Amino acid sequence: MPKTQKKTSNIKSLPPNPAFPAAALQTAKDDSEITALSLQRGKLSPAMEGYFGKCTEKLGFVPNVLSAYAFDNAKLEAFVAMYNDLMLAPSGLSKLEREMIAVAVSSVNRCYYCLVAHGAAVRTLSGDPALGELMVMNYRAARLSKRQRAMLDFAAKLTAEPWSVEEEDREALRKAGFSERDIWDIAAVAGFYNMTNRVASATDMRPNSVYHAQAR
């Protein structure tokens, strides 16, 4: 199916690398051919138009996942509301920990979009580029606290073998210092990214090229 999305002018692409011209062309296309589906942008509500404007103001670009959802304002609003609640609202989990869950889950699912986008978020929030790479490749190789390791072990198991999660796994989180609400939040964030990973993989969703160079 042809890809008809138009290049968004407010996205800053990476400069081409003369040593790797094919790679530069590939990432540049990610800003124009966002998904493999030919879905035209619908009419957005004033709230969502404002949200896109805020993204441009704060980030310098609109994340491609939002552009991908823009064919249906109701779905876009639902996605934004869930993301903002899980990732930005007050929680016993830090913003970095929530981004770490996103990357660990996406690594199990091999989701290109989320590994690139949330790997960049881990690098930015932690100030540690190596941690972002470790999270993408194998979080078990990272020097994590016992709390973080328990959290990610739970999220990875919930992703790979959800039927095998039992009281022993929840108790391990309690022993690591997580409250009952924290356990809910870990599960909710992991569940959200399992959903987004599958939608991204099903539609061949591509991350903004600017993510590749962030916080390195």
Image: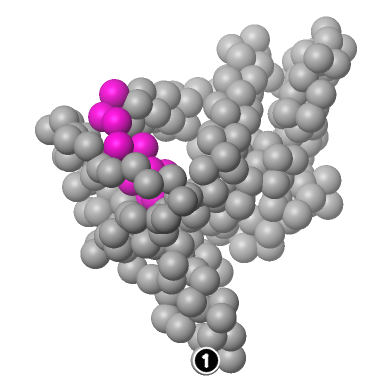
Q: Quadrant of the C terminus?
A: bottom right
Q: Residue furthest bottom?
A: 18
Q: Which residue is pictured at 44% across the width and 67% down the height?
A: 29
Q: In this view, does 62 lie to the left or right of 118?
A: left
Q: Which residue is pictured at 37% across the width and 62% down the height?
A: 32
Residue identified by numbered label 1: 18
Against 183, residue 6 (above or below) is below
Q: Foreground residue, 191 or 140?
A: 191
Three-letter code for the amino acid on which mark 1 is drawn: Pro
The image shows residue 144 at horizontal and vertical percentages of 76, 44
Colouring used for the render: one colour
Task: Say whether residue 118 is visible.
Answer: no
Against 121, residue 167 (above or below) is above
Q: From which residue to which does the magenta span run?
A: 63-74
Q: Foreground residue, 2 or 126?
A: 2
| Magenta stretch holds residue 68 | yes
The image shows residue 6 at horizontal and vertical percentages of 29, 59
| Magenta stretch holds residue 23 | no
Q: Which residue is pictured at 83% across the width and 52% down the height?
A: 141
